[in-house]
Image (spheres, helix red, strand yellow):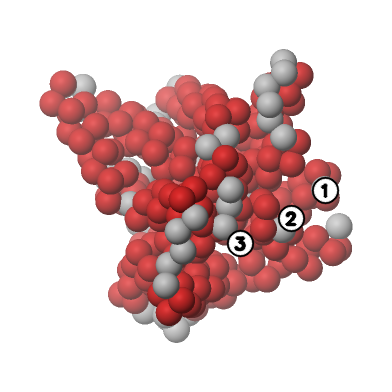
Amino acid sequence: MLGILFVTFPFFALVLCGYLAARRGLLPQLAIPGLNTFVLYFALPCMLYRFGAGTPIAQLLDASLVAVYLVCALLMVAFTVMLTRKGRIAWNDASFGALVAAFPNTGFMGVPLLVALLGAQAAGPAIVTILVDLLVTSSLCIALSRLDSADIHGAEVAAQKALKGVALNPMPWAIVLGALSSGFGVALPGPVMQTVGLLADAASPVALFTIGAVLARSQMTSVAATPLRDYVPVALIKLVIHPVLVGLVGLGAIALGVPLERFALTVIVLVAALPSASNVALLAERFGADNGRIARIILLSTVLAFFSFSAAVALLT
């Protein structure tokens, strides 16, 4: 367990550094969008391309893996919406609460952390989960968030925005290009690949630092206090129910004869045990949801995940 903590500590320490830098004013709030842009449009796509290009395409097209993770993502969204809609929370806030419950921080934190813990072969299953969350989970929750305006035009606009968001997100395109490079055996020219490598190497530290800064900014700009009952249960759902659900569904699928590898199942269970994706706070802000609530869920899940994720690794490896 101590050895696992030694591996996970630097990742969470970088998040803390970004958080403290923003809270103390060492990093101006106006600089945070620039860091986000660098990570989202330059560093992280290069890292995902490199992993995709180095992963056998059959692993990226594992239908069993996609099916198990997708079923769990849909169940998580349905359960969290049903639980939160019973209270005072409308569709917009309930939908983004469901998104933070079902969408792990796989791109910014999960891929580099799991590769450090389990080796490069962990990248393939983790990248599959990113595709599912970007293409399906995010689009579904954005569409559900528009149900507060019940007319048909609201639904159409929601669908258009969801599709536009997917089309403009560079991460799935980077994975697809990497998969095509792997499948056709095409390699980039040496100088170009070295440039990609430099940007890819910057992805993890800058992304983790940016996570902390985004969380601090969201907390500082929140004007209203959020009751504990509105965000603590969702953080616990993310860290406890999500990985347990993925594990149970995966084991059930294997028992039924589904060709799902045990190693791949271990990876996606650990993916589910990650804290909530920090980019959901940006989406919530864009679509007018309660960003203070979403930021608190992400922050709490990130803090608690240092212990819960380490415990999950100790149990599964």
Image coordinates for residue 227, horizontal then vertical, percent: 49, 43
- Residue 31 lies, in percent from the top left, at 34, 76
Query: As drawn, which residue projects farthest toward the front?
Result: 185
- Amino acid under label 1? Thr
Say what secondary structure mark 3 lies in. helix
**What whole-number distance in Å separates the C-alpha atoms at marks 2 and 1?**
9 Å
Labels 3 and 1: the sequence-earlier one: 3
Do residues under tags 2 and 3 come within 8 Å of each other at their CB atoms?
Answer: no
Q: Which mark is residue 118?
A: 2
User: What's the residue type where badge 3 is placed?
Assistant: Pro
Task: Tell me which residue sits at (33%, 73%) in the image.
Answer: 34
Residue at (78% x, 68% y) in the render: 6
- As drawn, 191 above or below 316: below
- As drawn, the label of residue 317 is 1
Query: Can residue 210 be seen by looking at this rendering?
Result: no
Identified by mark 2, the residue type is Leu
Between discs 2 and 3, the one toward the N terminus:
3
Which residue corresponds to the image point at 64% horizontal and 65% vertical from the top-left?
12
- Give the residue pinned by disc 3: 112
Which quarter of the rendering shows the N terminus?
bottom right
CA–CA distance between discs 3 and 1?
A: 17 Å
